[in-house]
Amino acid sequence: MEKRDNAILYGVPKVAYGQDGCTPLPMCIHSCAKYLGLCVDYARAMTESGAAFRFVWNTACWDGGNVDAIFTFDDPVKVFYCGMRAMERELKFMARTPETKKEDFTDFIRREIDAGNPVIALGIIGPPEACVITGYRDGGNVLMGWNVFQEYLEYQACVRFEKNGYFIAEDWWENPDTTALIATGTGSLPPLTPIEVLRNAAEALRGRMCGTYAKGILAYDAWRNALLCDRDFPADAVFSLLVERMMCHGDAMDSLSDGRCYAAKYLRRLAEQHPAMAPGLNAAAGELDGIPAIIWRDMIPVLGGWERGEEQTRRLARAENRRLLARQIERMKVHDERAYGYICELLDDHL
């Protein structure tokens, strides 16, 4: 059969940061599932992928990639496996290695698009966060789709747009952060059981070190310690360094606010479906809800708002403000510890 040069899937829901979510992988899962007629809302995609329970801080540096969903588990592929299980699909994953050719990626993309299935990719535009490929031209040399970074000013030189808003990217292979492809049109699998979801949640929440990354509950200590390190906020610091600090701090707040909110929503839904587990599930949900409450009620006012502008950046640089924030981090850690305890009790009681 002769290969097409062009194909596009119209009607794939937009993926963009906003009130409906700020974690790209589950946003992409939700978008693809909706297009394919599967019942997977954002809360399910967040929680069943495990991303809702992630929290990571690189102890070696102020790392703008801390919040990437790929760090949810110690096995970097597991979050994608669990994410596809949320769609009740098998994982078909192609990673970019030194031996991978552009044609390997374009063949993968064309097969999926030609079969009517969007592709989830890491990278294409900007950093290696998840995006959705909805079409191709010129045999795959040009790609279309949705990417959370497509409207960012720093990427405008390499992006054009379809009339419906899809990005058009020609230099996607030259982007070194284009690192993987995930098919959405794979074979069906049964949904994750509540015990499987809780076991994955406990795995993500458990405090541990993975290389230089503090993960789960242990990440709170690393975040707190970074804020209290005055030498990282020198009085004569150039503003760009303070912006980096603000971005890492803001990303930590966003990942916790977004993740724990939707995890609590999912666990309460699970409690309605499984009355025998309801007390523990609702107790865990209540603890998780306490984390975004602290962020919005007690942390954001210290910074003067949720934005990441000059005012917030300058306020974060002040030692007295960072000490106030450190105390709130300690409170949030207690909520996650309690949620983790309830989840472990449920696993012990129902295995």
Image (cartoon, grey):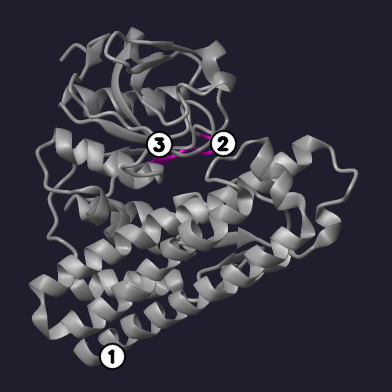
* Most foreground residue, 180 or 12: 12
Asked whether, in this view, residue 11 is left or right of residue 337, the answer is: left
Which quadrant holds the N terminus? Answer: top left
Disc 2 to disc 3, how far (Cα)? 32 Å
- Label at residue 98: 2
Based on the picture, tell me whether residue 96 belongs to the magenta stretch. Answer: yes
Question: Which segment is the magenta one?
Answer: 94-99
Q: Residue at x 57, y 49 (%)?
A: 250
Label 3: few (<14), some or many (≥20) within 10 Å? some
Q: Is residue 236 above or below residue 215?
A: above
Instruction: Measuring from the top left, give residue 177's x and y in whole percent.
Output: 54, 34
Residue type indicated by callout 3 = Tyr
Instruction: Measuring from the top left, give residue 106's x and y in whole percent.
Output: 36, 23
Asked whether, in this view, residue 275 is left or right of residue 128, the answer is: left
Q: Residue at x 10, y 81 (%)?
A: 275
Instruction: Measuring from the top left, give residue 229's x and y in whole percent.
Output: 79, 63
Label 1: few (<14), some or many (≥20) within 10 Å? few
Mark 2 element type? loop
Residue type indicated by callout 2 = Pro
> Residue tagged by mark 3?
17
